[in-house]
Image (cartoon, grey):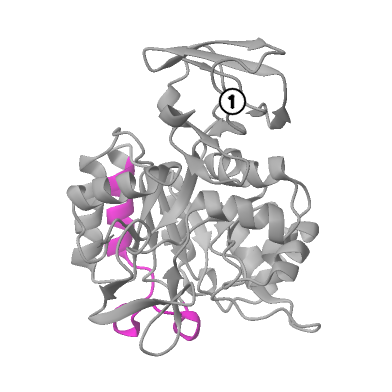
Amino acid sequence: MLITPEFTYLDGRLKTGLGIEAADGRVKRIFETQSSGDHSPFLFMPGCHDLQVNGGGGVMLNGSPTSDALRTMQKAHASLGTTAILPTVITDTADVIDAAADAAIEVKGEAGQLGLHIEGPHLAIERRGTHKPDFIRPLDETTVRTVERLRDAGVTVMLTLAPELADRDLMGRMVAAGAILAAGHSAATAAEAREGLDNGVSCFTHIYNAMPPMLSRAPGILAAALLSEGYCGLIADGIHVDWDMVRIALAARPKAGLTYLVSDAMATVGGPDHFELYGQKIFVRDGALVNAEGSLAGAHIDMVTSIANLHRKAEVPLETAIAMATDVPRAAIGLKPQRVGAGAALADFIILDEHLKYAPLEAA
């Protein structure tokens, strides 16, 4: 196969005049070319990496905490251009979270499986969003042992918690085990959030959402997050965060490469237009997912659409938007960027057309 895209995302930049020769599912060489070649897609890039995926393909991890569910979710997102996911189990009973951990251990090493994101149950109840209040509790030995078990099995773990409510020693044990601590669903003051950073927090979950608004005399966790060198996840569906607020967030960061896109996808992505969570039906309504209380209940968007939104609606340079869906989330969980080069697996890359829509590589 010879692919001669208009643009190739290479070493963090969009480059023109490059051809990719591939055979037997591997990149054989990259070469300079002036010819259109046999294939002319618009953009060749690494597949998206999504660190917050609650569901997909009609399946929610909370509702079906099994290895089969993880595989269904991965396939659904892969069909939309996301080649790797961090499946996410949200606030629930210890048994459900443990079952999700067992499933993550079972699929470790399979294509597209990055580990497990445990979002809750150690959250600020006033910032719970759609998380069920009955299951919210302080950080405890039960969760710490689950995280340690996952890390002993070599599984990447991200745990979202409210740092102002978490025991420092228990946080330290998880950091020592190699877990990634993320602050989210939190009412922390700026000082409390910075203390969380000092105690091992390295990420912030879906910035703006489930956080108090930033005020002139109460900057809160939001200001601490944006001004820090911690990684921040961002939902770019135009529903969770206004585009002006996206621009403000990116402008406030101390340097590039600290903010990554997440879908916060639910079962409707690559699946039906509704699903059940905590016994409630959640529906897609005007592009948003809402529960019976009218609260946002995750998102109905994929990562490729998020890239297009960020570029067109928030006026973010395309190569920056691509990095936020590829290189930056990988860095947030300790992985190096994927690079186009001899020997690279073709399955790890995708193409987009001139409308920034995903197209299967076979259609190039």
Q: Where is residue 179 in the image (x, y as percent from the top left)?
A: 43, 48
Q: Is residue 291 above or below residue 91?
A: below
Question: What predominant SS class does the magenta segment belong to?
Answer: helix
In the displayed structure image, the side of residue 199 where residue 34 appears, left or right: right
Query: Is residue 200 among what the camera can see?
Result: no
Decide which of 16, 182 is in the foreground and name it: 16
In the displayed structure image, the side of residue 44 where residue 12 appears, left or right: right
In the displayed structure image, the side of residue 234 where residue 83 appears, left or right: left
**Is label 1 in a helix, a strand or a loop?**
loop
What amino acid does circle 1 point to?
A: Ser
Q: Position of residue 265 (x, y in %)?
A: 42, 61
| The quadrant where residue 8 appears | top right
Counting the numbered discs, the total is: 1
Q: Is residue 145 magenta?
A: yes
Q: Is residue 263 above or below residue 210?
A: above
Decide which of 52, 37 is in the foreground and name it: 37
| The quadrant where residue 274 appears | bottom left
Q: Mark 1 points at which residue?
A: 40
| The quadrant where residue 247 appears | bottom right
Q: In this view, does 227 lie above or below 130?
A: above
Write the residue at 49% across / 28% down. Answer: 364
Q: In the rendered structure, which segment of residues is drawn in magenta?
A: 124-151
Q: Residue furthest bottom?
A: 293
